[in-house]
Image (cartoon, grey):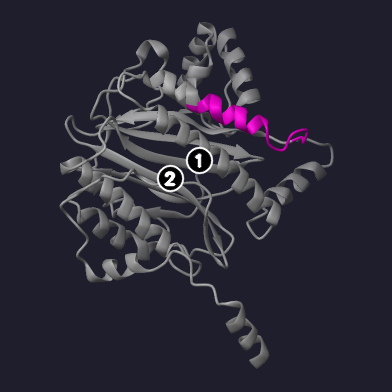
């Protein structure tokens, strides 16, 4: 919002810095969370043998858009996808959101990671889960990888408390994943989320990677975090193959005077529809605009979210949810449980971790009587 005197800009910045101490912010996070959770449940239920991944991704996006259109009706407010539906199979680590012509069909036994997100007024709710197609009982390495992701996520939510440091979490996350003979995928982190941003400044590494230091930080009350765990039965090193990238995001600070008309049109459309959040080529059915997008990428006006792969034959799993750090304990705004029937023959044996995982996620509430007694003493 440009203005002659800069007042609007200042007002906008002040507006953006609201944290979860404001009930309306918590409410927007929770509304966004409910939409994301419902959408992922719908996609999970539709993930059956023979189903096209492109169609399933479109189903997830459609469900999110429909649900968003029904909340905060008549209010002038940005709402939309914060991450288009991606369904990444087996050794694919993420961002697979194919066009119809590049789609694949789900097969029995496929390990499918479903990842999506929405925002309401810029407050982001991201969620991911992993399903095994057509198998109610999961054993062997698939079970190890599923259990590793689950236990790592269970570890993080118990440690994501005001006053704790990010450096305290990483060794315990590594132990959780190691217990199942797996490795966290390089480069995937849990991070703070802020308004209109899917990656915040405070970061939790899922494993120590030599040469990749993150700044030490302390969690504070009223912050919001996306907990993201992606685990592999292999080394956790992912690379791009020749799968076409379809998920992009406007690189906000980059400018370039585009010569091609189709590129200018593409950029105009993107800036209107997805000024700050990632989007998928799937929703752009105009081949000229798609061509223009290639040009925008070449001039670094769009950031790519490339499709990444672990070695052939390895299995990659994911659990992602968002948490608000409230004084009364964490509020999980997204996240769905992995299916029952996952039977790994491995388990956590580290005593510190075993003890941690036994703790409740929320501190026990005092009974009304005890609270009244305390108040009387005071």
Q: Residues within 10 Å of mark 1 (few under 14, many from 20)?
A: many
Inspect this view and state whether residue 371 appears: yes
Inspect this view and state whether residue 299 appears: no
Q: Position of residue 362 (x, y in %)?
A: 48, 66
Please name whichever residue, 108 or 283, is drawn nearer the observer in this view of the structure: 108
For the point 16% across and 31% down, which residue is it?
A: 313
Q: Position of residue 11 (x, y in %)?
A: 78, 47
For the point 48% across and 18% down, which residue is it?
A: 282
* 19 in the magenta segment: no
Q: Which residue is mark 1?
A: 37
In the picture, the quarter occupied by the C terminus is bottom right
Q: Is residue 247 above or below residue 161?
A: above
* 62 in the magenta segment: yes
Q: Residues within 10 Å of mark 2 (few under 14, many from 20)?
A: some
Which residue sits furthest right? 4
Q: Using the numbered discs, state the Cα–Cα distance from disc 1 to disc 2 in whole angstroms.
A: 7 Å
For the point 74% across and 34% down, which residue is it?
A: 73
Please name whichever residue, 153 or 165, is drawn nearer the observer in this view of the structure: 153
Which residue sits furthest bottom? 377
Q: Position of residue 218 (x, y in %)?
A: 48, 65
In the picture, the quarter occupied by the N terminus is top right
Q: Which residue is mark 2?
A: 336
| Residue interval drawn in magenta | 60-76
Q: Which of the 4 quarters of the picture holds residue 135?
A: top left
Tags 1 and 2 in contact by the CB under 8 Å rule?
A: yes
Mark 2 lies on a secondary structure that is loop
Is 70 left or right of 204, judged from the image as shown? right
For the point 28% across and 55% down, which residue is it?
A: 208
Q: Position of residue 148 (x, y in %)?
A: 26, 50
Please name whichever residue, 329 or 230, is drawn nearer the observer in this view of the structure: 329
């Amino acid at each position: 919002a440009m203005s002659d005197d800069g007042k609007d800009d200042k007002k906008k910045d002040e507006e953006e810095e609201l944290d979860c101490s404001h009930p309306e912010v918590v409410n927007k996070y929770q509304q966004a969370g409910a939409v994301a959770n419902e959408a992922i449940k719908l996609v999970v239920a539709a993930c059956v043998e023979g189903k096209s991944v492109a169609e399933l991704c479109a189903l997830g996006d459609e469900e999110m858009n429909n649900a968003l259109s029904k909340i905060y009706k008549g209010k002038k407010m940005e709402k939309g996808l914060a991450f288009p539906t991606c369904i990444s199979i087996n050794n694919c680590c993420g961002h697979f959101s194919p066009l119809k012509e590049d789609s694949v069909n789900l097969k029995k036994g496929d390990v499918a990671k479903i990842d999506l997100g929405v925002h309401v007024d810029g407050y982001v709710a991201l969620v991911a889960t992993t399903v095994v197609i057509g198998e109610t009982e999961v054993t062997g390495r698939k079970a190890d990888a599923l259990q590793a992701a689950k236990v790592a996520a269970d570890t993080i939510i118990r440690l994501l408390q005001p006053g704790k440091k990010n450096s305290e979490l990483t060794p315990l996350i590594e132990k959780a994943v190691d217990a199942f003979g797996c490795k966290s995928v390089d480069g995937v982190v849990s991070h703070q989320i802020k308004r209109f941003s899917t990656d915040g400044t405070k970061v939790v590494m899922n494993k120590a990677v030599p040469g990749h230091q993150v700044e030490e930080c302390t969690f504070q009350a009223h912050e919001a975090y996306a907990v993201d765990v992606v685990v592999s039965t292999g080394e956790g090193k992912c690379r791009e193959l020749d799968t076409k990238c379809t998920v992009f995001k406007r690189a906000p600070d980059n400018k370039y005077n585009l010569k091609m008309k189709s590129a200018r049109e593409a950029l105009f459309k993107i800036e209107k529809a997805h000024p700050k959040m990632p989007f998928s080529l799937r929703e752009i059915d105009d081949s000229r605009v798609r061509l223009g997008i290639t040009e925008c990428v070449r001039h670094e006006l769009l950031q790519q979210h490339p499709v990444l792969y672990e070695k052939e034959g390895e299995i990659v799993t994911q659990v992602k949810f968002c948490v608000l750090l409230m004084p009364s304990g964490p509020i999980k705004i997204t996240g769905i449980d992995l299916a029952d029937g996952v039977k790994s023959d491995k388990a956590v044996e580290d005593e510190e971790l075993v003890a941690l995982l036994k703790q409740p996620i929320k501190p026990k509430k005092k009974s009304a009587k005890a609270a009244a007694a305390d108040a009387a003493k005071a």
